[in-house]
Amino acid sequence: MPITATGLLFVLIMGVICFTAPRRYAVLPLFASVLWMPVGQSIDILGFHFYAFRFIALLSLIRVLIRREFPIGSWTVLDKTVLVWMAIFVATSTLHKPQVFSTRLGMIYNFAAPYVIFRCLVTDFQSFKTAALIAIMVFLPMTVLLVVERQTGKNWFYLLGGVEETSAARDEQVRAQGPFAHPINAGLAGAMTVGLALLLWQERRKTALLGICVGLAAIYACSSSGPVMAGGIILGAACCYRWRAHSKQATRWGFVGLIALQLAMNAPVWYLIARVKVFGGSTAWHRAELINSSFKYFNEWWLAGTDVTRHWMPGGLDGVNEDFADITSEYVWMMVAGGLGLFLTFVVLLVHAFRCVGKMRAWSENGGTPGAHPFEAWAITGMLLAFSITFLTISYFDQVKTYWCFITAAVSSWWASTALQKAGASDTSLSLLPRNLEPQEPVPDPAAWQGDQMEQLK
């Protein structure tokens, strides 16, 4: 539906904040556009659908250019992997139906714009935590409305346009949706809010507890198994903090266990997903069967993806896209969208994110990352683990993908800022610093370089 007067007023107010807020608070409009405005209302410009989130992202990019708030430090391995991922996405899109190309460009914009914005506005780990605090505070009023929706069956965001007034329900349980396109995505935003709250645990214990309660309330309101699993992974990882030194061994034994199950089970090991049902009526079997179909029809998608998957599954997207099955997996969607190259690049991005956070946690153990406690780095690992597992069963198809962009870009900025500090460089703008300036070992005396350089970064 066309964007309403309320939507235009929201864009105007957020635009003013975008251009007037200090750098560390300039992420507020982007989070507000994700959590307060539905994507159903938009304006068509040259064939592209511009809703509130895309307008605010565009204004944020303009702000960054005008103020020259460029990313700090050198190009990180995450930046380069994201660039390769986007290049493959664009290249493979030319091999799909012509009418799909503009849609693919919009998808790239939805990922690339917030990634660049967060990479520019998050300058170090302290600003990472400030952005997390902003995200929690912006999420709070939305959670209140989600809980009200869960109790009444009425989505009050319909007043803004773009979503239905009556909430979805399954097995007599209302599934609150809020401004998101699906209740699962609203619940995932709640799960990520729990993870962001853990970043504040060392400095703001009461705020962190509030954020955890807010995130869990959103998960409850949405009545979906995927968000429950994501929130459980994040909290479970936090509880395992004291055993963090054994994480590599646990990962290895986990893979060994999966191989053993594959050998012992009659069905492929991914059919374990079909047994994970927190709420009745869950479509867990569909998700397992979708993964099975991606292997079965490998010859159709491996080169550059495919435009026809309706024959993969008994359920499709009738009335939305008659040629497509319901792709309820981010990994499978990468296969369908861009083939084996896009899928592998996406997996490599995840692996690099885990490695960067793991190294930063190791350095923080020795005082080599100022302002960062090892538990905070461990909390980020928990969020990345939740992403990597829920990507098996959930496709992030609306503005909830911004959380993935935020975590990835903030980790990249944290890495780059630490590299810059260790190099003793005074220029904090993006530059092609030699690779040997990346942090390689803990700094014996972090206080020697912490003061002046941190002030410059701020």
Image: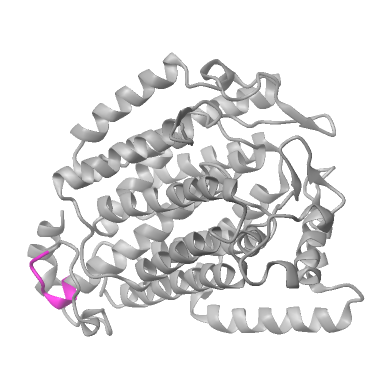
Q: Residue 59: where, in percent of width, then height? A: 29, 37
Residue plotted at (65% across, 42% down): 184
> Residue 28: in sight, yes or no?
yes
User: Is 188 on the left or on the right of 349, as rendered?
Assistant: right
User: Between residues 105 and 404, which one lies in front from this camera angle?
Assistant: 105
Task: Name the residue located 58 percent from the left edge and 45 percent from the top edge.
Answer: 99
Give the camera-side residue of 401 and 275. Answer: 401
User: For the image shown, how many numbered marks are present on the structure?
Assistant: 0
Q: Is residue 203 visible?
A: no
Quarter assignment of residue 364 = bottom left
- x%, y% of residue 334? 60, 61
| Drawn side of residue 198 relative to residue 372, left or right | right
Identify the residue at the far right of this view. 266
Asked if the magenta segment contains residue 424, the reply would be: yes
Q: How is the image coloured?
A: one colour
Q: Is residue 418 above or below residue 158?
A: below
The residue drawn where x is 80% and y is 61% is: 288
Q: Closer to the camera, 229 or 85?
A: 85
Q: Is residue 295 above or below residue 120?
A: below
The percent position of residue 267, horizontal first and vertical second, equals 89, 72
Task: Estimate the x, y position of residue 150 in percent, counting from the top left.
Answer: 68, 27
Q: Which region of the structure is painted magenta?
A: 421-427
Q: Quadrant of the N terminus?
A: top right
